[in-house]
Amino acid sequence: MLLIGIDTGGTFTDFIYQDGNSWKVYKILSTPSDPAEAVLKGIAHIVGCRDVRIVHGSTVATNAILERKGAATALITNKGFEDVIEIGRQNRHNLYKLFYRKPAPLVPQQLRFGVNCRVNSDGTVLQEPGNKELNEIFKKIEASGAESVAVSFLALLFDII
């Protein structure tokens, strides 16, 4: 069985694959209008009719975040934690710079939505969101103009006694 690792980049789509006991590299131009086109073309070139296992990463997604060129994204998270993405950490490059300005958050405040939901560290659901609450949030997201939705729930690392 072939093992293929793929990285879809802005300029090139890179493939590294194990064929028997040797590793090989294949590189083709990316297709920015449809990144899947280059991925599928590269897989077809390497695989033929053999069984394959694929691992895929995307520099395109990383670059979209770094360059802030991605879709307008809504964030659904635990109620009370909507602003963690903006608060961040105390650590910063210019700790004593009086007029320091943090970069704008990746998700603006008006696109962050909190849900009454809690999960502990072993995956046990402690509080499940209700359908009415979820439907209200979905309506708000739809009205917000968001083009995508990220869901990030926090797990409690300890049980509350």
Image (cartoon, helix red, strand yellow):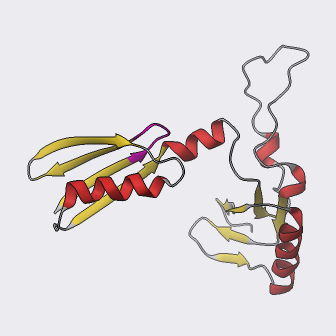
Q: Quadrant of residue 91?
A: top right
Q: Determine whether 16 is above or below 128 in the image.
A: above
Residue 154, percent from left and from top: 69, 60
What residue is rendered at 82% in x and 37% in y? 104
Q: Determine whether 127 is above or below 55 in the image.
A: below
Q: Quadrant of residue 55?
A: bottom left
Q: Is residue 9 magenta?
A: yes
What residue is rendered at 72% in x and 63% in y? 149
Q: Is residue 108 magenta?
A: no
Which residue, as the protein is rendered here, is positioned at the far left?
A: 21
Q: Determine whether 109 is above or below 124 in the image.
A: above
Name the one closer to the observer, 57 or 79: 57
Which residue, as the protein is rendered here, is positioned at the far bottom?
A: 131
Residue 133, percent from left and from top: 86, 79
Q: Work out which quarter of the rendered image holds the N terminus and state it.
A: bottom left
Residue 36, percent from left and from top: 45, 57
Tell me how many marks there are.
0
What residue is rendered at 86% in x and 20% in y? 100
Name the one closer to the observer, 20 or 91: 20
Which span of residues is magenta-colored?
Answer: 7-12
Say left or right for 154 vs 24: right
Q: Determine whether 78 is above or below 117 in the image.
A: above
What residue is rendered at 81% in x and 78% in y? 134
Name the one closer to the observer, 55 or 118: 55
Name the one closer to the observer, 156 or 107: 107
